[in-house]
Image: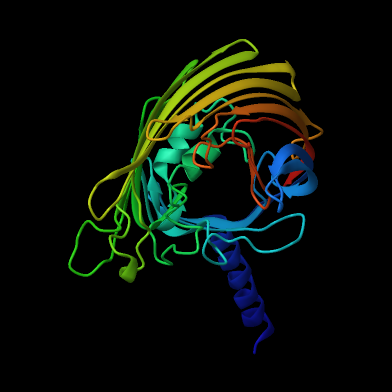
Amino acid sequence: MHPKLKKSLCAMFVLGAGAAHAQTAVNVYGIVDAGIVSVNNQRAASGNTGSVTGLSSGGISPSIFGFKGSEDLGGGLKANFNLEGHFLSNSGAGSQWGGLFGRQANVGFSSNLGTVALGKQYSPAVLAYASTDPRGLKETFSGLLSWALTQVPLNTGAAAAPANSTSVIDVFVANAISVGTKVGDLNLNGSYSFGEVAGSSTENRTIALGATYTGPLTLSAAYQADNGRRTATAGGSGVQTRKYSVGAGYTLGDATLTANYLDNENTNPANDARLARYQVTGLGLNYRTAPNNAATLAFYYSKNKEGSNDNSRTLILSDDYSLSKRTTLYALVAGVKAGSGYTFGSPFGVANDKVLLGAADKSTTAFQVGVRHTF
């Protein structure tokens, strides 16, 4: 090959690669979160209760890894993808909510008009709920556990759960198409999960909707309906859920006040008989004591209207100290007073790799310290 021609081809290749790189971006991201937790009044094998201390994965956030990227298609249109998995930082074991990328596996488009995504993704309803939760849906002692565990029995995570359920603890939705748009300070999002059951257009279907207004005053509203599977022989989940939430938050200087309400009704999908109805109220005060430090005082009251004294009252004091933009130290002390009929369906506690919750008719105290690093 002529040296000048060879040089021209090399230059064209370099320029072409540079143009492709400018239009396409792929990022690797993740969180590693681990801490020591100590909780008393936990059920022992003997049937009595005692104290337990252990190393827990996830205090502020779950430990996750992921890949996300976008390609500029021109005219303000982008193609996007997101793959996200879950692991336990204390043991290295996978905890994938249904697979290697059990949290997210989706592809779609975005523009100045909004977004469209297809695949497994976060429920638009839980994202709206998170915006006014007193503890921002942190992994421990927050509204996350009430949102996720108030399906009795659980749609997924239990031994009898169907592998193809469209809702994973009502936090993630699978087989879903979602749309979202922003109008001024108002975000509107919704998703539809195909039930994929022969002969029925509604069985196993999940619909999730979320709306958030963000400013000095934050307002949120969320609705999620999971139809479940009707029969055990078809891999039925045994529960149909309808939940909604409303909330508000107000920021004044370094202080932010939040309040929200969650109502979750469970029915038998075979006959629509009510199994449980959980109502959870949360109140919180977050105060930024320094640019890199935030203290939070939160209170939750949870009750099941279908149960007898199935309730809990929880008070949490926590502090998050940022050593840098990516590394945070955290500490927490919490007290839980559970009713005599308390069940795990109205929980507040530690539930990731350690299921450490309150005990019926007892006061439970928890202490937690840990570190979170993002990359």
Q: What x and y, as percent, mark residue 45?
A: 71, 53
**Left or right of 47: which side holds 280?**
left
Q: Residue furthest top?
A: 252
Q: Residue furthest bottom?
A: 1
Q: Is residue 220 above or below residue 181?
A: above
The answer to whether any part of residue 353 appears in the image is: yes
Q: What x and y, as percent, mark residue 37?
A: 77, 41
What residue sits 76% from the left and 41% below the top? Answer: 50
**Left or right of 39: which side holds 103?**
left
Q: Quadrant of the N terminus?
A: bottom right
Q: Nearer the viewer, residue 160 or 134?
A: 160
What residue sits 67% from the left and 53% below the top? Answer: 353
Q: Nearer the viewer, residue 307 or 161?
A: 307
Count of numbered circles on the image: 0
**Left or right of 136: which side holds 45?**
right
Q: Nearer the viewer, residue 131 or 301?
A: 301
The answer to whether any part of residue 26 appears in the image is: no
Name the colouring of the figure.
rainbow
Q: Is residue 226 above or below residue 371?
A: below
Q: Is residue 44 above or below residue 147?
A: below
Q: What x and y, as percent, mark residue 333?
A: 74, 28
Q: Is residue 245 above or below residue 230?
A: above
What residue sits 55% from the left and 63% below the top? Answer: 101
Q: What x and y, as percent, mark residue 201?
A: 19, 60
Q: Nearer the viewer, residue 116 or 143?
A: 143
